[in-house]
Image (cartoon, rainbow, N blue to C red):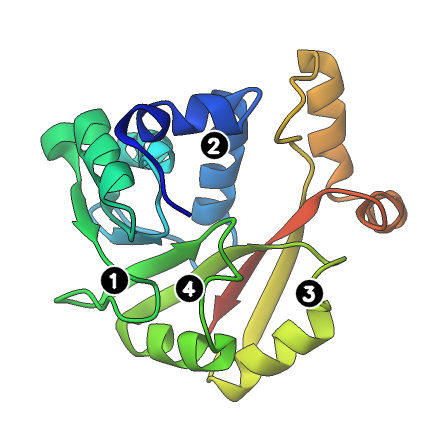
């Protein structure tokens, strides 16, 4: 998808009803799911858009590399983050960092790789701790994704429901209740039949 400079510059604000709440919770799960992250370790954010996620990772002492195929998005991310992060234009099927990273993320873009299993295998080569991505279970059967990850060398998969709506800004008490519900199995299964997604953490250990 192509974005002009004006649309790219307001992408997070247009894409999310409450971007701070949405991205903060996403960043929290990047940090908390699976292996712990140490200060100074690097998050590689593929299909990073305007780099909005970085604002909620950098304060925790993590380094950030954002990659997007859109020149307009790359420019928007560079304007947002300045010298606080590295932003690179690149394709999810081709980009590889110059050094290994602790975490690779891919959000709202699981359909970008031309061959998911090959993508998972390539990312495993340069990702030391974990791969974190979101998954719509009504679009991608979790069992199929689990199999593709295992074939690519990712032996562990943890799936956490993500109940912050993208296009609706809920009152804070209701949003807190929904986030608390993310750990209630029966309710999660029911909600995920109709909407919402998982945040998935894959690791090799």
Q: Which residue is mark 4?
A: 130
Q: Is residue 61 visible?
A: no
Q: Identify which residue is drawn at 66% across, 13% down.
A: 172
Residue 90, numbered circle = none
Q: Which residue is mark 1?
A: 101
Of marks 2 and 1, the one in the foreground: 2
Coordinates of residue 106 in the picture (x, y in percent):
44, 55
Q: Is residue 136 visible?
A: yes
Q: Determine the secondary structure under disc 1.
A: strand
Q: Which residue is mark 3?
A: 140
Q: Identify which residue is drawn at 44% across, 63% down.
A: 131
Q: CA distance from mark 2 to mark 1?
A: 21 Å
Coordinates of residue 187 in the picture (x, y in percent):
88, 43
In this rendered view, identify the residue nearer to me: 52 or 101.
Answer: 52
In the image as oriented, which residue stretches furthest toward the bottom? 151
Which is nearer the N-term, disc 1 or disc 3? 1
Of marks 3 and 2, the one in the foreground: 3
């Amino acid at each position: 998808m192509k974005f002009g400079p004006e649309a790219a510059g307001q992408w997070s604000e247009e894409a999310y009803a409450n971007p701070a709440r949405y991205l903060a919770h996403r960043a929290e799960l990047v940090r908390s799911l699976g292996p712990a992250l140490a200060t100074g370790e690097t998050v590689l954010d593929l299909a990073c858009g305007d780099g909005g996620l970085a604002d909620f990772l950098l304060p925790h002492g993590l380094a950030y590399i954002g990659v997007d195929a859109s020149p307009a998005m790359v420019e928007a991310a560079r304007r947002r983050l300045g010298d606080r992060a590295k932003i690179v234009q690149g394709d999810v099927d081709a980009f590889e960092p110059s050094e290994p990273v602790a975490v690779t993320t891919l959000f709202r873009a699981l359909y970008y790789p031309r061959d998911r299993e090959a993508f998972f295998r390539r990312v495993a080569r340069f990702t030391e701790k974990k791969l974190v991505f979101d998954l719509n279970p009504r679009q991608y059967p979790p069992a199929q994704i689990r199999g593709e990850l295992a074939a690519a060398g990712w032996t562990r998969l943890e799936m956490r429901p993500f109940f912050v709506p993208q296009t609706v800004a809920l009152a804070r008490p209701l949003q807190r209740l929904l986030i608390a519900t993310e750990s209630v199995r029966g309710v999660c299964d029911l909600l995920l039949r109709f909407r919402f997604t998982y945040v998935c953490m894959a690791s090799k250990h």
